[in-house]
Image (cartoon, helix red, strand yellow):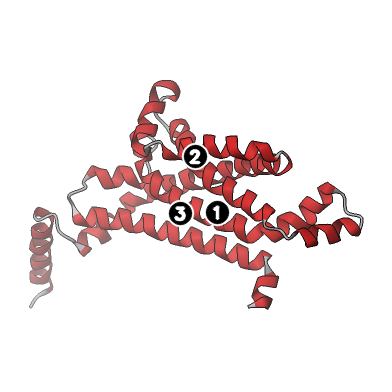
Amino acid sequence: MSLLAQVQIGNRASDSCLADNGFCPDWIAQNFDRYITPFTEHVYLTLVSVGIGFAISFGLALLAHRRRWLTGPITGFTGVLYTIPSVAFFLLLIPFTGRGYLSAFIALISYTLLIIFRNITTGLRNVPEETKDAARGMGLTERQLLWRVELPLAVPEILAGLRIATTTTVGLATLAFFAGAGGLGSQIYTDINFKSNVVVAGGLAIALAAVLDLIVLGVQRAVTPWQRARA
């Protein structure tokens, strides 16, 4: 069979696949570049949201660690934010903050707070009292105790919360297009009935979540060598 005949057959097969909204490897190979910008937007939405969310949660957790009575109100407030339906949250923000990244960031950051806050406070409070007493006996101040003893020992719980928040944010960021922020969700819903489109955009979101999870896990293993030694 001549090369021209093979190309013609391939084109007919590709046209038939597109007409059936099927899975078309040829179409994916030829159109993969259209997913680069949405993927970059998705990474940006995820990293900025998780970074700001972690900073806010970390500050709140340290405050609650010193003022135990604040734990309940902070948990309650962040819990209310977490229970707001995601699509509704994005749409409700638009009249106040407009369409774009700001509305998307407010919603995505809000969803990270409860997860990270609870893991940080749990990690700090799981530090054994005898360990803290020994540190005080060595002359450490409360500030030194926090930064040299409590936080290092709480790292596994803290990073576990960060992993959950990161993968959750990758999923929620697919809805950020409702706020006009783009991301892979905008590409998915452009043609949700076309299997090739959904497979590529959805697959990129899953791959991003997996890669970010592995990165955080690698950081956890690097900063907690005592766990590897114990294992």
In the image, which disc is placed on residue 169? none
Query: Which residue is label 1 attached to?
Result: 161
14 to 90, vertically: above or below:
below
- What amino acid is labelled 3 in the image? Thr
Query: Which residue is label 3 attached to?
Result: 167
User: Which residue is painted at 45% across and 36% down in the image?
Assistant: 107
SS assignment at label 1: helix
Q: Quadrant of residue 196?
A: bottom left
Q: Closer to the observer: label 2 or label 3?
A: 2
User: Which residue is painted at 10% across and 57% down in the image?
Assistant: 15
Using the numbered discs, state the Cα–Cα distance from disc 2 to disc 3 in whole angstroms: 18 Å
Binning the other alpha carbons within 10 Å of mark 3 as few (below 14), some (14 to 19) or many (20 upward) gives many
Q: Position of residue 168 (x, y in %)?
A: 44, 50
Q: If you read the primary sequence from the N terminus, does the residue marked by circle 1 or circle 3 appear first?
A: 1
SS assignment at label 3: helix
Near-viewer residue (18 or 103):
103
User: Which residue is painted at 87% across and 49% down in the image?
Assistant: 141
In the image, which disc is placed on residue 79? 2
SS assignment at label 2: helix
Q: Closer to the observer: label 1 or label 3?
A: 1
Count of marks placed on residues: 3
Residue 37 in sight here: no
